[in-house]
Image (cartoon, grey):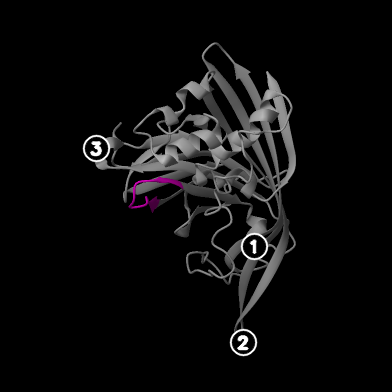
Amino acid sequence: MKRFVLLALPALALVFGLAGCGSDPTSPPAGNNASLESPAIQAAMAEVPELADVETYEAPGEAEFADAYAPAGMFSTEAAIHPVFFYRVIRERQRDVQIETERDTVFETARVRVVDRFAGSFNIVAADSVDTGVVVSRIRKPLRDVGVMRAVFRRPIDWEREDPVTNEIASDGDRERHRRCRGWRLVAVSNRQIASPEHTAKIVSVRLEARSGLDVTITDPRELMRFPNGLPKVVAGEPVKVTVQVEDPTDRLFLLCGWGRLRLRPVADGVFEGGFKAPYDLRRFRVGVNALDRGTLFDDAAPYDSDFWGLLAHTVPPTLAGN
């Protein structure tokens, strides 16, 4: 087994940027096999932009103050602050990519671990009632989150013989992709966890349910799923019920999607429920579940404390959902 590590890589574009990746995988730098194949593996990963997860963890942003978050007892005297909206601003990013390769008589396999480090601020828009009306203020808390996800790529040992250039019906795009990615294909992927260091807000499990037959419980966001057939499948446009269990029942729970945000309601000790409607088109998509320590939102002196799971799923036609 061989191991190669890329340290402190700028921004997300290295792995999840445009598919070209700015490198020619057919002329990689000298080194062991993991180093040799790293640009091609990055190009193959860039073929799945949903893995970047920028539509949940970082959105909505400052320009999207919404009515979706208005906690009960907003002006109670028990809370130090009265939040009406929150958003993240990421100013620095670092990425560590670890690649391990192994071979058998048929395939070469690359196991990838991606660690993202985010630095910025967690911003709270707070409102207080006074004699003259409502005063709105903004509170910024330092943010230093760490995100982890895993992926597995595979290709035949004699991958050049599988080149679709030799196939008369292969499209130009297929041939270009094969050249760029040197035969590597994504065969397994995990969800992504992004959390603050030493976080006390901790998600225990997330259950996704739908009438079409979807019933998936996730207890480890870093567990690998077959790609793409092992991803949770939901009928396009179908409502999905989300049940989340956390360690601390005083945490606040939210669904973060590219099309909106929803606060989950407590239904039992440490159990929260809510739901969302799946996209209407057929595609892979992300939905985020975010647990925030109560002090993060209601105490201006308490530190930022967060546990976020970015979950990958796939919309399908009704006839495929049961499969």
Number of residues whose C-alpha sits closer than 10 Å to that of mark 1, classed few (under 14), some (14–19) or many (20 or more): some
Figure check: 281 above or below 230? below
Between the C-alphas of marks 3 and 2, the distance is: 59 Å
Between the C-alphas of marks 2 and 1, the distance is: 22 Å
Residue 227 versus residue 182: which sits nearer the camera? Answer: 182
Going 51% across and 24% down the picture, which residue do you hit?
160
Q: Percent position (x, y) of residue 37?
A: 63, 30
Mark 3 against mark 1, which lies toward the viewer?
3
Kindly identify which numbered label has been placed on residue 319: 3
Number of residues whose C-alpha sits closer than 10 Å to that of mark 3, classed few (under 14), some (14–19) or many (20 or more): few
Number of residues whose C-alpha sits closer than 10 Å to that of mark 2, classed few (under 14), some (14–19) or many (20 or more): few
Identify the image quadrant of residue 36: top right
Q: Is residue 279 magenta?
A: yes
The residue carrying mark 1 is: 298
Mark positioned earlier in the residue sequence (3 or 1): 1
Q: Percent position (x, y) of residue 116?
A: 67, 44
Q: Is residue 18 magenta?
A: no
Mark positioned earlier in the residue sequence (2 or 1): 2
Give the magenta range: 276-285
- Residue 211 in sight in this render: yes
